[in-house]
Amino acid sequence: MILLAQILQGAFLGAYYALIAASLSFLFGVLRIINLAHGSLIVLAAFLLFLGADRLGLPLPLALPATIAVMAALGYALYHTVLARSLRAGPLVPLLATFGLAIVLDNLLFEGFGADTRSLAPYAGDLAYAGFTLTEDLSVGELDLITLAAAILLLGGLQLFLRHTRLGRTIRATAADPEVVELIGIDARRVYAAASALAIAIAAIGGAVLGLRATFTPYSGGTQLLFAFEAVVIGGFGSLWGTLWGGILLGIAQNLGALVNPQGFLPAGHVFFLLVLIARLLPWPRLRRARPSLA
């Protein structure tokens, strides 16, 4: 029963990893860049929610849509001011640009909010603590269930959006071959800007769950980026459902590591990630032919 409980809690933790990794995976699938400011953007969203709840007195159900809108506008602006310019300069420049952006965001948040830890749990009532007891040794938290449902709905909704809407199909076509879509009259830059806005808006949901599950500081972005990157690599770059499974497998690996040794939580996840990474780098024919795609 203890093993089952650890696996279940690992799956719930993995759903959180999938939520914070969805934006990273989606942006890579469209623009083919790894956004090193991803973790800082998630923390920025958490602070915006904190600002709305603590300073403006907004309930979280109202603060979240406002934060998503602000983050979407920020994503649109970031594409035109940072991403589009850096993409024209080669594959290395976007990494350096987003790394610099992460440093700027972290220090701006430090200047604005200080180094104190924050949490959204006090503004969510008993959501962060309430749960259901299944057996004497097994219980499930309401927030865990909501996180898992949110991950499935978000990634499933993105999948449906990409396959069954005009904008979604345009994004997929532009991600596959921007030069061809330009020939048929589609402005690839506008598509990229819309995709960037959507990706950064998704990061706001990850920031909300971060704030509800744990505390955060202006410099928490690096840890979130690491977990998101590991989930994306395990699941496969650009694969939306792969991101969900990658996050779940990472969470289970971490919890099983903690079951073996109380200090094995993080090392177990990192070792599992390295094993998957090595397997992906081996010259398997199928892996050599695989290309990142929004699947």
Image: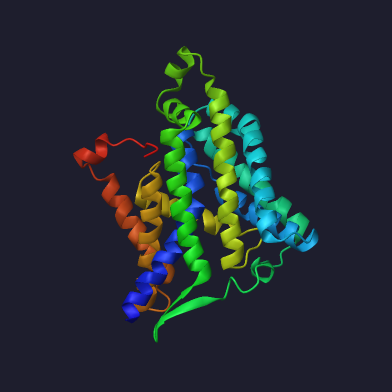
From this view, report whether residue 181 is shown above or below residue 102: above
> Can you say which quadrant of the picture contains the C terminus?
top left
Q: In the figure, is residue 226 to the left or right of 244?
A: right
- Residue located at (66% from left, 34% from top): 77
Q: Position of residue 192 (x, y in %)?
A: 54, 29
Residue 227: tell me if it is visible: no
Here the colouring is: rainbow
Q: Position of residue 165 (x, y in %)?
A: 47, 32
Q: In the figure, is residue 132 to the left or right of 254?
A: right
Q: For this rendering, which residue is in front, 240 or 94?
A: 240
- Residue located at (53% from left, 59% from top): 223
From this view, report whether residue 271 is shown above or below residue 158: below
Q: For this rendering, which residue is in front, 181 or 271?
A: 181
**Residue placed furthest toward the left:** 285
Location of residue 209 by image quarter: bottom right
- Residue located at (53% from left, 42% from top): 35
Q: Where is residue 44 in the image (x, y as percent from the top left)?
A: 66, 52
- Residue located at (71% from left, 67% from top): 116
Q: In the figure, is residue 81 to the left or right of 270?
A: right
**Residue placed furthest toward the right:** 56
Location of residue 291 by image quarter: top left
> Can you say which quadrant of the picture contains the N terminus?
bottom left
Q: Where is residue 228 in the image (x, y as percent from the top left)?
A: 47, 53
**Residue placed furthest toward the bottom:** 136
From this view, report whether residue 186 is shown above or below residue 17: above
Residue 284: tell me if it is visible: yes
Q: How many marks?
A: 0
